[in-house]
Image (cartoon, rainbow, N blue to C red):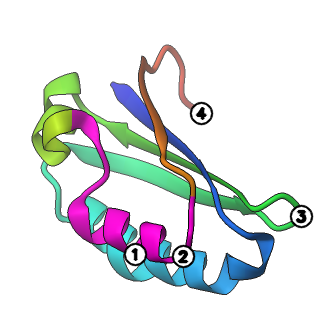
């Protein structure tokens, strides 16, 4: 298993808009992606920090779901419109899961 971690920053006042993007766009896209297993989309309201962790069956599943390694265009466009910072994206091997 592999986890894809995405870190970004938006204005703390944009919590509702970030939530809509995560629920209506990102989560819907993830659920239909082959190899997707689980995920959490997090927002820290005081700082505006956004953290997404998705779990995939293989690294190849991640690469297929995100060609080029970035955000999907619809999510990227919506986040950019909110003034969110460019995302930091990392992939980790999952060593343990509860």
Mark 2: few, some, or many residues within 10 Å (few <14, many ≥20)? some
Q: Do the residues labelled 2 and 3 touch (CB within 8 Å)?
A: no
Mark on residue 46?
3
In the picture, the disc for residue 78 is 1
Query: Is the C-beta separation of discs 4 and 1 under 8 Å?
Result: no
Would you name the residue on which mark 2 appears? 82
Mark 3 nearby-residue class (10 Å; few <14, some 14–19, many ≥20): few
Horizontal and vertical percent for residue 36?
26, 48
Q: What stretch is highlighted in magenta?
A: 69-84
Q: Do the residues labelled 2 and 1 touch (CB within 8 Å)?
A: yes
Up the image or down, 78 lies above or below 30; here it is below
Dots 3 and 4: beta carbons under 8 Å?
no
Q: Residue 6 carries which label?
A: none
Of the numbered discs 4 and 1, the one sitting upstream in the chain is: 1
Mark found first going from the N terminus, 2 or 4: 2
Which residue does the numbered mark 4 point to in the structure image? 98
């Amino acid at each position: 298993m592999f986890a894809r971690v995405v870190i970004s920053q938006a204005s703390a006042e944009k919590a509702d808009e970030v939530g809509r993007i995560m629920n209506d766009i990102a989560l819907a896209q993830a659920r239909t992606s082959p190899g997707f297993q689980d995920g959490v989309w997090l927002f820290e309201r005081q700082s505006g920090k956004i953290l997404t962790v998705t779990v995939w069956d293989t690294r190849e599943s991640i690469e297929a779901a995100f060609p080029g390694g970035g955000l999907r265009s619809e999510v990227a466009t919506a986040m950019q419109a909110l003034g969110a910072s460019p995302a930091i994206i990392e992939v980790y091997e999952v060593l343990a899961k509860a």
